[in-house]
Amino acid sequence: MNKPPGWSQEEYIRAYRFVAKAHLGQLYPGTGLPYLMHLSFVSMEIIAALAVEEVDHPNLAVQCALLHDVIEDTKTSYQKVKEAFGIDVADGVNALSKKMAVNKSHRLHENLERIRKQPREVWMVKIADRISNLQPPPLNWTQTNIKAYWSSSKKILTSLEDASPYLGERLFNKIENYVCYIK
C-alpha cells in the first residue's frame, strides 16, 4: 500500500470550494481563463514539493496555496478565513497578501519580511506563486515591467529559497528561462 500524502484531500477540497466561490467570475489576467486556474497551478506546485520534501504542516501549505489571493483579490476578510480555516492559515494568507497602503517601491520587501515571520510552508507558497506567474508576460507589459518582474523574482528566490530546495530549483529555472522576454 502506498504512503498517504501527508495532507488532507478533504481539506484541499474544502479550501478549493471556498476559493471557487470567492473568486467566481474573476479571470486569470491576459488569458480569459477562470482565476481558479492560477490557484490550481500554485497548489499543484506545493503538492509536487510535498511529494519529495517533508514539512511539519502540509495542510497549511496546501490550504495557503489555494487561499493565497483570497484576502488580496476578493471581498473575503481575514476574519472569514480565520473562522473557516483557523488562525495559522489566516495568518499565512494575510502574510502572502500585498498591502496596497505600502509604497510600491517597498511593497515586495515588506511582503517578504511578513512572509519570513511565518512557517516555511507559507514561504513555499510564495515561491510556488511566483513559479506559476513566470509565464509569458502580458502583451501590454513594457520592457520595464518585464525587467522589474524578473528582478523581483530573483529577490523572492534569494529571500525564501531555504524553505524548499525543490521549489527553489524550480523558481531558479523559471527565472533563467524568463530572460528570453528581456530585450
Image (tube, grey):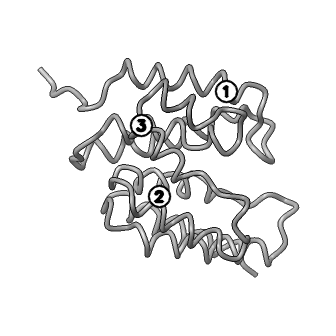
Q: Is residue 110 left or right of residue 14?
A: right
Camera-near label (2 vs 1) is 1
Residue type at mark 3 is Ile
Cβ–Cβ under 8 Å for marks 2 and 1 = no
Q: Is residue 168 left or right of residue 72?
A: left
Please provide percent x and percent y for residue 4: 20, 26
Residue type at mark 1 is Ala
Q: Classify residue 63 by image quadrant.
A: top left
Q: Residue at x 33, y 58 (%)?
A: 166
Q: In terms of sequence position, does the residue under pointer 1 or pointer 3 come before the other? A: 1
Relative depth, front residue between 32 and 107: 107
Q: Secondary structure at mark 3?
A: helix
| Residue indicated by mark 1 | 22
Q: In terms of sequence position, does the residue under pointer 2 or pointer 1 come before the other? A: 1
Q: Residue furthest right?
A: 140
Camera-near label (1 vs 3) is 3
Please provide percent x and percent y for residue 60: 36, 39
Residue type at mark 2 is Ile
| Distance of label 2 from label 3 (alpha carbons) | 22 Å
Q: Quadrant of the C terminus?
A: bottom right
Q: Secondary structure at mark 1?
A: helix
Q: Residue furthest front?
A: 79
The answer to whether 86 is drawn above or below residue 111 in the figure is: above
| Distance of label 2 from label 1 (alpha carbons) | 23 Å
Residue 87's disc is 3
Q: Residue at x 77, y 36 (%)?
A: 27
Graded by Cα atoms within 10 Å as few (under 14), some (14 to 19) or many (20 or more), the crowding at tag 2 reads many
